[in-house]
Image (cartoon, rainbow, N blue to C red):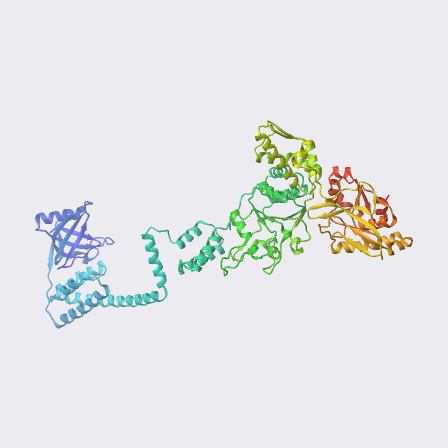
Amino acid sequence: MPLIKLVNGPVIFPQTMVPVHITSDEILTALEASVESYDKYIFAIFHDENFANDQRASLNIGTVCNILQTVQLPDGSFRVLLEGKIRARIKNLIQRQSTLVEVNLLKSKYKKTKKIEALMRTVRDNFLKYAHYTQRYSPEMIESILRVDNADKFSDLVASLIMITNEQKQQLLDEIHPSKRLEKILEILIRENELLEIERELDSKVRKRIEETQKEFFLREKLKAISEELGEKENEAVQFRQKIASLKLPPHVEQKALIEIQRLERMSPYSAEATVVRTYLDWILNLPWQTTTEENDDLSHAKLVLEKSHFGLKEAKQRILEFLAVRKRSKNIRAPILCLIGPPGVGKTSLARAVAQALNRRFVRMSLGGLRDEAEIKGHRRTYIGAMPGRIMQLIRSAQCKNPVMLLDEIDKLAVSFQGDPAAALLEVLDPEQNKEFVDHYIELPFDLSQVLFITTANVAHTIPPALLDRMEVIEIESYTEQEKFIIAKNHILPKILKEHALDNDVFSISDTAIVKIIRSYTREAGVRQLTRNLEKIIRSAILSLEERQKKFSVGVRTLKNILGPERNGNFELLLEPEIGAVQGLAWTEYGGTVVLVECALLPGKGELILTGRLGETMRESARIALSVARTFCGWEKKNSFELNDIHINVPEGTVPKDGPSAGVTMAVAIISSVLGKKVRNDTAMTGEITLRGKVLTVGGIKEKILAAHRYHIKRILIPKTNEKELLKLPKEVLNDLEILLIDNIEQAVRESCL
């Protein structure tokens, strides 16, 4: 009869029906021959493709089958239903090149002994147990098998149903005697039942553990499955993990993020704690841990940008260019922490913006004025409701790079409260040794701030905490001279305002003399803010006139009064002529230098000292020292003048607080002038701290004071000789307009100022 080799199975037992999927042309040929010539009988053997033909004798034993049904499938292959009839062994190959073989039928001969009956009963019990564990067989099938009383048929049916390998089934097929076959089946069933029992125990333990500890997890998985079915968004934990995989995070940040994601997965998505974790993950995954912007290290470009944006400020520009030059040579150099100190309106903030533009870095700004909470700098801890990172990390996130230019504005106006000292919190930020591992209370991970170029601004240095000031490189930005203001107004401010107001030079013009007049008569400041506001007012007036069909608008000295009103130079008026007891002093404020008038008058009394003008404690002490110096200078001849008169010293503009020791020499000269009856020159101003011995000591803000005197058109200035070195900082045009006299003691001051 025709032969078919079932490659890799299945193994067909007698008394069983097995469907076989046929794709081989050789097997199809054998099937056709069986149907046409052999009454649908065919010989089927199991063939393991891992072994060569005839390697094992067992491969020659197979089953004579009857073809019950043949169905062609859509893909061209066939499904054939075979019914096993009887075992057979290959006797001879009729044609080696064909599929036709001669076989010997193998009929089992046995007697139904007690041993066989006991084996059948034991196999039946173990098979029931096996069926119970596997749950693979229907009750009807089990019942039909159990009703079989023939040992040969029973063993073949059970062997065909056990889930074992084809090699094991072939071994059962090779056993012709039912007794030996039942023994092997029993051995297999006992082993399988033991394994299934162990698996069942393990499964029971696992299920119990899952029910006890991971019930919420399974519910969440079901919720996720429901969400996916409904077309809702992907699980947020998966989204966070995908984002981590796409980012190049430092190992400690990635580890922290994964821990938080695991916490999030164990939480209810609607709990308050889950919201906190989500916000935290959003923060740490959106910080630029490794992102930097490429610097422009072209010195000529940086110099061009700084010169184009600001006029003057040589020291500040020089320091920026020095940093850029060093950075170009060594990328490991730490960014400097610069502190720009100067009066309002001199361009500190705009200079920081120009630095960012010159270096091709991003610019972020934070105002520290009135800041009184330490958490504004270092953030709140996550245990608090509504906790957020500090402003430093917020600025880093908004910049989306770890090397921006960060401006900390008004650092001299930090406040202290019960919520902490923000200046102390800034110590870590502005310390090059510490800020490479800056830890925000909210983020709780070290962040490298060493590549940030910090620029701070202040009006005065004495209100900055010493520890904070020590960490910064101070660059003083002085007041502008009249000439500098003119150049700034003409080349920078005016073109900018014209561009903002969409005005061109064809319909608007302003003379140079008008600009100078505005500077002299309508502004008196260290910076250029008042000058900018006045020019904007002129531009607005010009636009109004042009809209009223005026073709061209020109501004000269004569038209300024109609636009800006009467001249205003503050309340101070220069002395028109020399007077007794009236001396012009120089003072320095956070708004720049200024000229103050010190008046002294002798009044009949008991030798008391009267001070008015809202003077601070330091200035009051200077007045007492000045009185003692004046009594020593005037000698015994003027003893009665001091004992029989009260000395009244007044500093006008009583609403303005005044303090400091630098008016000591001015008050001493005013007292001496009043006692001796000598007039003081009205073209002279002075500054200097006085000692009991009549020595004139060093004072601060000399450049600002001299520039203020120049603005007020004072020609002669007396300053301490020890301040001579600071004259080098003054512009040449200012020094050429002034006569600066250096004094050591009160005698020189009186000699140079009194007529």
Residue that sits furthest to the right in the current view? 637
Can residue 420 be seen here? The reply is yes
Q: Is residue 490 above or below residue 295?
A: above
Count up the numbered dots.
0
Residue 6 lies, in percent from the top left, at 19, 53
- View extreme (front): residue: 604
**In this view, 253 is above or below 111:** above
| Left or right of residue 225: residue 704 | right
- The image position of residue 629, as x and y in percent, is 84, 53
Task: Report whether 119 appears left or right of 584.
Answer: left
Left or right of 219, for residue 192: left
Q: Nearer the viewer, residue 546 or 257?
A: 546
Q: Quadrant of the C terminus?
A: top right
Residue in front for this viewpoint, 611 or 493: 611
Residue at the image point whose x is 82% and y is 41% from the top: 577
Residue 714, position in %: x, y?
78, 40
| Position above or below: 678 against 203 | above
In this orientation, which residue lies closer to the viewer: 724 or 324?
Answer: 724
Q: Quadrant of residue 196?
A: bottom left
Q: Is residue 559 left or right of residue 207?
A: right
Residue 182: x %, y % from top left = 17, 66
Can see residue 96?
no
